[in-house]
Amino acid sequence: MRRQTVLTIFLLAVLTFSWSAASVHASSVNYVVHDGEVSVKLALSLFQNATAMPSLNEKFTGVAAQSLTSAIEESLKSEVGNASISALSGELRSSGDWINASIQFDVTGVASQSGGILNVNCSWVRFKVSNDLKLGDVSYNLIGARYVRPEFESYADYREPPLNETIKSVMYRVGQEDTDARLAIQSAGNVTLLDFSNLFPPIEKWIGTYNATKGSATWAYNGAPATDLRMTVIPREGAQFVVHAFYKYNATLSVDGPAQAHSDVITTEVAGSYETLLMLIVVVATFVVAVVASWIYRSRRKQLPRRRK
């Protein structure tokens, strides 16, 4: 009985750890289209154990919020010239191996209307920010250049003195493929938190669903990791160790009401569209004409001479 209890506790601990590890890696990018405006919510987690990052838990305010707003808007404008963002908020947490960011903002200037049809250009959803952004002591965007690449570079010449005296071999891997030091170092330097170019298929190729209960259309995409780098170092004495960088996110785009996706353009009907307004005008005009005609008719009847008996 005691043995079964211990085994049960062990299994629960393993399951809890597995769930925690899986949930920590889960990042999401969510876009919600409403009346020609797009609300963006980013929940991002990036792992790297090449360099211990400073501990931080701060909100985006003041200069940090302004710098992030400008950087994102600049990236969006390179795709859609009239795009602008507002109401940016969020927070950043980092500790040791992990960096977690929660960022929200609204995007305007990406929609055009033709009659009762609204076209929302979402080609900017795979935007990439190339700026070295900082909050406190943390460089939270160009993580690869700041924290990962230096460690990869430090073992590039392991066959030469003095590293060859202590290091037996170094192996590099990108995803599931072995690679050489040059390509691995280049990939390490490209690790960027605000890089969503991995959402490369057009939105119409994402998995689309329509929720009749909520009256909303949704497209979802869950691709390969944006970053999956490993460097395995085998010393001549002692145990090997692995330097790993991992970053993966999924994406959803939701629209109120029925909608269609044509490449990266979302087409939907406008609430209170021109046709509806025109119909209302016709109804009101008809009512006014009827009232006026009735008034004229009654006025003329009053003016007619009455017959004598």
Image: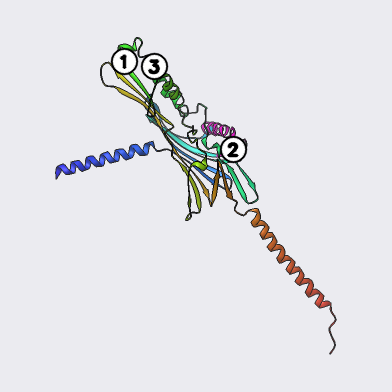
Q: Position of residue 83 (x, y in %)?
A: 60, 37
Which of these two is toward me, 69 or 31? Answer: 31
Q: CA distance from mark 2 to mark 3?
A: 43 Å
Q: Is the stretch drawn in magenta largely helix, strand or loop?
A: helix
SS type, badge 1:
strand
Q: CA distance from mark 1 to mark 3?
A: 11 Å
Q: Indicate left or right for 242 with 184 as reference.
A: left
Which residue is the site of mark 1?
167
- Any mark on residue 84, and which? 2
Q: Indicate left or right for 200 with 174 as reference.
A: right
Report the quarter where the N terminus lies.
Answer: top left
SS type, badge 3:
loop
Q: Indicate left or right for 157 with 80 as reference.
A: left
Q: Are marks 1 and 2 in contact (CB under 8 Å)?
A: no
Residue type at the position of mark 3: Ala
Q: Residues within 10 Å of mark 3 (few under 14, many from 20)?
A: some
Residue range of the region highlighted in magenta in the rendering: 63-86
Residue type at the position of mark 1: Ile
Q: Position of residue 227 (x, y in %)?
A: 42, 30
